Image: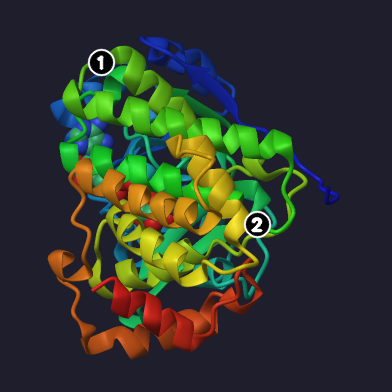
Amino acid sequence: MQNFDYQTPTRLIFGKGVVSKLPEVMAQFGKIVLLTYGGGSIKKIGLYQKVLELLKGYEIVELSGIQPNPKYNPSVLEGVRLCKEHKVDVILSVGGGSVLDCSKAIAAGACYDGDPWDLISYKVKAQAALPIVDIITLAATGSEYDCGGVISRTETNDKIGYIDEHLFPAVSFLDPTYTFSVSRKQTAAGIADAMNHTMEQYFVEDATLLNDGFCESMLRSLMVNGRKCLENPEDYTARAEMMLACTYGCNGILALGNSESGWPCHGIEHALSAYYDITHGEGLAIITPRWMQHILSERTLPRFVKYGINVFGIDSSLPEWEIAEKAIDETYKFFQRIGIPMHLREVGIDDSRISEMAHHIAVNEGLEDAYAPLTEKDIVEILTASL
Ligand code: NZQ
Ligand code: ZN
């Protein structure tokens, strides 16, 4: 087991109706609030109006229109400008992972005098950030419980996972009823995203029985409850368990003491989203089985065998290579069954920019240090197999 130094300072407030605690929670941070949200889903579900009612007496400054794969320009820059101009005390993010990720970059940028890109690109280390409170409305990223935010800069085709300990939300509200309205497409993408977060931490050299069990249980829970959410979007129990599982995804708790994985599928997918603005979870679902097939070898075989038996219940008496191949096939079929398009061409990506993307990934994502190291050539092969 590897050494670690771990802390998650975020307070989680979970369950039906918990948003009523918002005034009490916000009071500790000040009176001037930057309210961030996306394209309008929070208005359709009545959450926007509810928040304004609960925050009567606060000065609310709004930043709306934050897009999926949130953009540095204009959203982050505009948010930073608003925070400085209005001397904002706290950011309240209401929406999915994109709104929250954007809010995190704004929180850091608001406490920095230079160009916020210096922080996101790791040229300068943040010294502080505004406090962030969020009401998460989509179960997927785990951003509500981690200190990362993923920001896209269109003109350079960059999509950077910006991680800094100042970016943990102070408080996250998780009310599963707000996820009832999430579309089939986004629900399926959320399942795939959270499953891949788990797999990225499961396929490592040095793991423990404890973490393996946690990851395998996460994957089974996400598959069972994810399908229930798709069958009946208002199944509270399924939405609730899916929401909690997604929350565990990225804050490191699944991998305490494990060796590094390199998060290869995320490294590859972030380039797909950066170049083509596709839905993150769909890109991951397409890449994952092809990546698995690519890295299956004598060395990685035991992990795939364990995964196949404990996650999909494949007969342990079968030959090991057969179990591994079946496990990869089951992974593909699960994503296909929940309605995810399983080819890059189906999400508008052809072979014209594969070498350019593979080069960008190889230079920026450090995948030569992954559990199964990937060179630029490997990345080309994975992307080509995903077409
Ligand atoms: O913009 P609005 O109108 O709110 O609509 C959103 C958006 O169109 C909609 N939506 C959200 N909640 C809804 C809803 N529709 C109906 N009912 C609701 N309750 O869903 C669409 C997608 O929203 P988005 O926030 O983009 O989805 P998600 O939460 O999956 O976030 C994806 C982003 O997070 C990044 C991804 O790369 C991507 O940019 N990630 C962030 C991570 C992190 N911070 O730890 C880790 C992940 O690996 C991931 O990379
Ligand atoms: Zn992800």
Of circles 1 and 2, the one toward us is 2
Q: At x 37% / y 10%, what residue is drawn?
A: 16
Q: Amino acid at mark 2?
A: Val
- Please tell me how many numbered marks the rendered image carries: 2
Above or below 60: residue 387: below
Between 203 and 41, which is closer to the camera in this rendering? Answer: 203
Image location of residue 316, percent across then percent down? 53, 40
Between 332 and 162, which is closer to the camera in this rendering? Answer: 332
Disc number for residue 48 = none
Q: At x 58% / y 67%, what residue is drawn?
A: 119
Image location of residue 79, percent across then percent down? 39, 53
Label 2 sits on residue: 204
Mark 2 element type: loop
Q: Compare marks 1 and 2 and give the one earlier in the sequence.
A: 2
- Crowding at dot 2, Cα within 10 Å, few <14 / some 14-19 / many 20+, comes out as many
Q: Amino acid at mark 1?
A: Asp
Q: Is residue 362 left or right of residue 351?
A: right
Image location of residue 17, percent across then percent down? 36, 9
Q: At x 35% / y 89%, what residue is drawn?
A: 356
Label 1 sits on residue: 235
Q: Is residue 197 left or right of residue 34?
A: right
Above or below 280: residue 335: above
Image quadrant where one finds the C terminus: bottom left
Mark 1 CB within 8 Å of ligand 1:
no
Mark 1 element type: loop
Marks 1 and 2, how far apart at CA: 34 Å
Q: Is residue 318 left or right of residue 210?
A: left
Above or below 275: residue 190: above
